[in-house]
Amino acid sequence: MGSMRYLLYKDYASGLFNNWISFELGAGLAHLTKRRLVLYGSVGEERRLLHIRGGNYQYLRPGFSAVLDNSRHPTVLDLMDTATVELLDYPAYRDAAQGLEMLESDIKLTRAAYVHGARSAEDAMAQHGERLAEFLAGRDILVDPNEASWHLHACNLGFYSRFFFNPTPELASLLKNIRPRADYRNLAEKVSLALGPFNGVHIRLTDFKQFLPQGADYAGTILETLGSTFPRDELLVICTDESHNREFFAPITAAFPRHVFLDEFIVGEFAREFLGLPFTDEQSLGFVCNIVMWDAREFSGTPGSTYSGMIHRHWYSRRRAQDARSDPPFRFINCGEAGKGGSEPGYFENGAFVECRKGDFSWTRTAIRRASETLSWYREWPESAIDSR
């Protein structure tokens, strides 16, 4: 055991999709550095993972209480297929790693990018020069340290598209196989088939109404954007955390008479199948909804939401699988700024951020008004299709 190397990696105790993208970074780093991944949390002396956060666990709306069970909550590992990732729990690591030299790293992964094969930040820049500087966009360089045990715990969050510089085909294969467990995927496939062809939108409200307030006529802004991108006679599938808020959605549903609220559709039409899942809480319902949305013909998401980001990633990959030459834009319900409409010429048009500069990477070709660190989680990027780089 003395020759083993370890990555001691603190999970990002948050919502499911923050957990998911955080886990991917740890798995990818462990793979590239040939370390055993020790994914730990904050529960008890054994440092077990905390269950997925978020949702309205204290209240279930009428019609949902007979289907959802919020008394049992999964961790990210309960919902994901992680068969290709070698994991070690914290107690086993604690016993095996006694006496090993450890590097305690305070670096935030949101503020860093990993360069495989480099011995130091200086070596990385010497090897890759301007292209790496463009990829970093002001962030720090992360390399594999010499210590046998490497501890990352500060802010382990970010989309892999913006974290791994020059990813290998083996890394791409690993990341693609970190996916929802088969029973959740199978139910999502049945729901998608029942819906038929559809356009999809994810509109996050709840905490975003305070975290990213959008002004008094937020619904009107969303409708302005959707009206410029989606035909109004086609089926619009609405994925949201407030499907009960009919007052908010009234302008949108009036403009798109063929519409479905996805969570209500699943609870109403697939209750038996949903009840057969290992977990039937609110987060698991949202998980199935997310997977269904990957099949949308066109999709528009909420900026700042990793839930939307994961839909964008898989939607984009499926579009490219159908036509490798396709490069559809990632569309959003607005530009993410209060008081801004659905169109801002030269910056945000037809639901998409405009590429207004030259560059090797999508985040350097756009000028989104967010800090470089924020852009690591704020939205997914086309670079998520690793095989296309």
Image: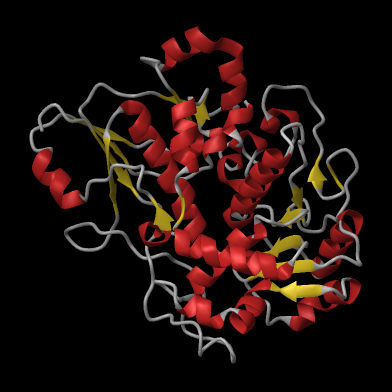
How far from the left and from the top, in percent, is residue 158? Answer: 51, 43
Q: Is residue 252 above or below residue 386?
A: below
Residue 338 screen position, x and y as percent: 76, 58
126 or 32, which lies in front?
32
Count of picture labels: 0
Residue 368, quarter of the rendered image: top right
In which quarter of the view is residue 232 placed? bottom right
**Which quadrant, please, contains the N terminus?**
top left
Q: Is 96 rendered above or below residue 255?
A: above
Return the x and y of residue 131 as percentages of the image width and height: 60, 16
Position of the C terminus, as image quadrant, is top right
Q: x, y (%) of residue 196?
A: 75, 65
Specify whether 43 is left or right of 320. Answer: left
Q: Is residue 316 left or right of residue 374?
A: right
Tell me which colouring the rendered structure shows. secondary structure
The quarter of the picture where residue 137 lies is: top right
Visible residue check, residue 63: yes
Front residue (pair 272, 225): 272
* Residue reaching furthest to the top: 126
User: What's the residue at 42%, 10% (across, down)?
Assistant: 123
Is 248 situated above or below 100? below
Residue sitting at 62 percent across and 46 percent down? 313
Residue 92 relative to residue 373: left or right = left
Q: Is residue 26 left or right of residue 97?
A: right
Query: Measuring 63% from the left and 75% from the top, which residue is drawn there?
Result: 263
Q: Is residue 300 above or below residue 59?
A: above
Q: Nearer the viewer, residue 129 or 2?
A: 2
Would you say residue 15 is visible in this rendering?
no
Q: Residue at x 66, y 45 (%)?
A: 318
